[in-house]
Image (spheres, helix red, strand yellow):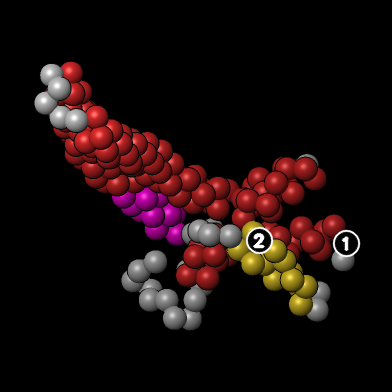
Amino acid sequence: MNKAKLDEQMLDLFDKLRVQDKKVGHWFARVLRERTREQQQQSQVQVAELNRQLTLVRHQQDQLLNLRHLEEIDPNTFASKGTELRDRVARLTLQVESLDRGRSEVGEIAVKAFELSQTLKQQWLTADYRAKRRLLEIVRLNFKLDDVNLVPEWRKPFDVLAEGLDSENSRADRI
């Protein structure tokens, strides 16, 4: 297969990822951004609650230490309860960190993936060999050769765009 034929097939495949109706494309990107914003707001509420719990547990740690200084609890009870509270602080801190990172990253990646899918054809036409290879690494897992045609195995979320919008089972009123 020569370079021109390969480029032609790649451009045809990229067309499957592209939302042809610009209004639908803008709507889809807007919905992705809105959902990302909603998820970030939910995440902020969850982080606030986890931080509230962290404050309470740290206060309990302080109280426990004060009780030990006043010798109102024995060393074994102090050690046991101290370990329990330290573990709770570690768990809550880990949850806060994962919420802070996870939600915003996933939303941004979804929006960027959609935006990339809409410009793949133009990027392919102007890309050098290395850039084309990188584009392929981003959007597909593998290719199979069916006779003389390339059949891609798309990465998520590109598989949804390739199959969902062109599926016989899809409804015209939704994506």
Q: Which of marks 2 and 1 is in front?
A: 2
Q: Which mark is residue 141?
A: 2
Left or right of 52, for residue 158: right
Say which amino acid is labelled 1: Asn
Question: Which numbered disc, 2 or 1, marks the residue that appears first in the sequence?
Answer: 1
Q: In which quarter of the image is the C terminus?
A: bottom left
Say which amino acid is labelled 2: Leu
Tell me the magenta residue range: 21-35
The tally of labels here is 2
Q: Residue 2 carries which label?
A: 1
Residue 96 at x, y percent in the picture = 32, 37
Q: Is residue 157 visible?
A: yes
Q: In which quarter of the image is residue 74?
A: top left
Residue 118: within the magenta? Answer: no
Q: Residue at position x 30%, y 36% from top? A: 83
Q: Residue at position x 41%, y 38% from top? A: 101
Residue 163 at x, y percent in the picture = 52, 70
Decide which of 26, 167 is in the foreground and name it.
Answer: 167
Q: Is residue 62 visible?
A: no
Q: Residue at position x 68%, y 52% from top? A: 137
Residue 23: within the magenta? Answer: yes
Image vertical order of residue 23 relative to residue 88, above or below: below
Left or right of 30, for residue 73: left
Between the C-alphas of marks 2 and 1, the distance is: 22 Å
Q: Extreme right residue here?
A: 2
Residue 27 at x, y percent in the picture = 36, 53
Q: In which quarter of the image is the N terminus?
A: bottom right
Q: Residue at position x 33%, y 71% from top? A: 173
Q: Residue 137 carries which label?
A: none
